[in-house]
Image (cartoon, helix red, strand yellow):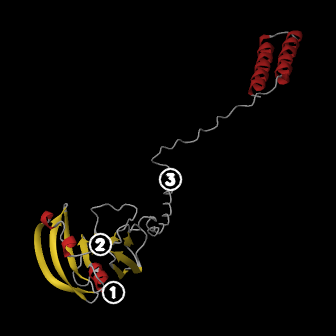
Amino acid sequence: MKKVQRTLATVLAAMMLMALAGCSKGDVTKEVNSGLSDLKAQAAEPAVEPQTETPAEPKTDAASEPASEPASEPEPEATAEPAPASAPADNPDYPSAAGLNTQTLEAFGTDYTLVLNVTCPDQGWYKSASTSFGDLKLFPTDDPSHIFSGDPRITFELKSGLDKINYYYDSFENVEELATRTIGGVEMAGRTYKNVGMWWTEYYGEMPTGGWLAIKISGVDIDPGTEGDTVLNSITFG
């Protein structure tokens, strides 16, 4: 639009100059027609709209950005209750000795027999299933699947006489005599000694039905009030 205005002003100025200069009417008319032609040509050109620059979005640095919300802490996982301790694996060679145990003891090479009754705690005591010599072995342990020759035990053996009780006496080390102890109604002598690398407490005495009973204790506490003491106090003879 501004360009058209400038051209129109130029034509008018030219006409005025020609008139002042004494140009002929034909010249003026020719000049005017030429100017009008230019105006028509310019008017026919499409107007170009001025482009306005889109203002750039202001940059923001990390410091100006709003702080993100703190991540929520994970909920604490529920702590599982510890599983109860599993029962010891069964061992047919060493079944449980819980409760009353009745065993017929035999004196090797004789007709002497003795019915032994002994009661063990409800848990933690096992016995040997093998009684080839007519004896009874009790083991206090948490794992009956692993019982070895040196493990704690109480052994009951019936012998034909005192000489058989003392058969290995010469191999005993550090022998000390103990006060007698009444077991199952029978007063029995006592002693401690070391034999085959193990310390033993032994009570022995003659049985009313014949033969001599030896009770050998190794690695088991038999002080008053202990489980070992309770086991010895439970003994009766049938």
Query: Which percent across, then down, holds residue 81?
Result: 47, 69
Q: Earlier in the sequence, mark 1 or mark 3?
A: 3
Q: Earlier in the sequence, mark 2 or mark 3?
A: 3
Within 10 Å of disc 3 (Cα), the crowding (few <14, some 14-19, many 20+) is few
Query: Which percent across, then down, holds residue 156?
Result: 30, 74
Q: Secondary structure at mark 1?
A: strand
Q: Which residue is mark 3?
A: 66
Q: Which residue is mark 1?
A: 236
Between residue 122 and residue 108, name the one nearer to us.
108
Q: Is residue 163 above or below residue 28?
A: below
2 relative to 178 in the view: left or right: right
Q: Nearer the viewer, mark 1 or mark 3?
A: 1
Image quadrant occupied by the C terminus: bottom left
Residue contact at pointers 1 and 3, CB within 8 angstroms: no
Question: In the current view of this chain or complex, which residue is farthest to the bottom?
Answer: 185
Residue at 21% across / 72% down in the picture? 165
Marks 2/1: CA–CA distance: 15 Å
Q: Which residue is mark 2?
A: 155
Q: Identify the amino acid type marked 3.
A: Pro
Marks 2/3: CA–CA distance: 82 Å
Between residue 62 and residue 166, name the one nearer to us.
166
